[in-house]
C-alpha cells in the first residue's frame, strides 16, 4: 500500500512540476476584484476602453495583471539508442520474455462434453441406507 501511494505521489509531482499555467488578476483601484487561473478574468464591469479618449485615459482605475508560471521543460529523456549494448540486450530480452509470458493456452478438447449422464432410476444411497458422515 505504501509503495502505491509513493508511486502516485511521485507521478503527481512530475505532472505538477512540468505543467505551465497563467494567473490573471483584475484590480479596480488598489482592490483585487477577481483572480482567474487558466481563463481570462472577466473584470468588474467598469471597462472604459470603448469610451476612452486622450483626456479620459488618465482616469481609468482598472488594470489587469497576468502572471505566467512556467513549468520545467528540461527533463532528461533517454532514447533506446543512447543505452549501452548490454542495457539494450537486457531490455530487449526482458520485453520479449514478458510478452511471451502471457501467451494463450491452446484450447483443450473435452471428450465427454456432448454426452449427458444416465438417468437415475432410484437413489441407491437412500435405498441402501449408506450416508457419508
Image (cartoon, rainbow, N blue to C red):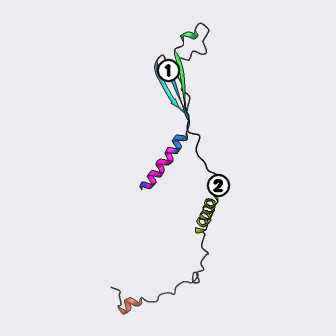
At horizontal 39% and vertical 89% (from top left) the residue drawn is: 125
Q: Magenta span covers which residues? A: 3-13
Find residue 98 and report its image quarter. Answer: bottom right
User: Residue 52: percent from the left, percent from the top?
Assistant: 60, 12
User: Residue 115: percent from the left, percent from the top?
Assistant: 57, 84
Tell me how far mark 1 sits from mark 2, CA to CA: 51 Å
- Work out whether residue 118 or residue 100 is closer to the camera in this orientation and state it: 100
- Local SS, label 2: helix
User: Residue 11: percent from the left, percent from the top?
Assistant: 51, 48
- Work out whether residue 132 or residue 107 is closer to the camera in this orientation and state it: 107
At horizontal 66% and vertical 54% (from top left) the residue drawn is: 81
Answer with mark 1 or mark 2, whichever residue precedes in sequence. Answer: 1
- Local SS, label 1: strand
Determine which residue is flagged by label 2.
80
Dot 2, crowdedness within 10 Å: few (<14), some or many (≥20)?
few
**Residue 8 falls within the magenta-colored stretch:** yes
User: Residue 5: percent from the left, percent from the top?
Assistant: 44, 52
At horizontal 52% and vertical 85% (from top left) the residue drawn is: 117
Quadrant in which the N terminus appears = bottom left
- Checking the image for residue 27, the label placed there is 1
Do callouts 1 and 2 mark residues in contact (Cβ within 8 Å)?
A: no
- Work out whether residue 41 or residue 76 is closer to the camera in this orientation and state it: 76
Dot 1, crowdedness within 10 Å: few (<14), some or many (≥20)?
some
**In front: label 1 or label 2:** 2
The furthest residue to the left: 133
Whether residue 65 is situated above or below residue 7 in the rendered picture: above
Task: Tally the marks.
Answer: 2
Amino acid at each position: 500500500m505504501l509503495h502505491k501511494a509513493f508511486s502516485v505521489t511521485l507521478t503527481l509531482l512530475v505532472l505538477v512540476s512540468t505543467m505551465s499555467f497563467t494567473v490573471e488578476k483584475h484590480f479596480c483601484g488598489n482592490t483585487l476584484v477577481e483572480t482567474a487561473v487558466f481563463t481570462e478574468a472577466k473584470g468588474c464591469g467598469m471597462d472604459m476602453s470603448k469610451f476612452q479618449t486622450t483626456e479620459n485615459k488618465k482616469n481609468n482605475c482598472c488594470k489587469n495583471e497576468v502572471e505566467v508560471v512556467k513549468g520545467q521543460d528540461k527533463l532528461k529523456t533517454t532514447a533506446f539508442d543512447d543505452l549501452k549494448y548490454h542495457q539494450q540486450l537486457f531490455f530487449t530480452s526482458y520485453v520479449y520474455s514478458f510478452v511471451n509470458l502471457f501467451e494463450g493456452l491452446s484450447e483443450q478438447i473435452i471428450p465427454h462434453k456432448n454426452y449427458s449422464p444416465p438417468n437415475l432410476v432410484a437413489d441407491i444411497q437412500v435405498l441402501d441406507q449408506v450416508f457419508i458422515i
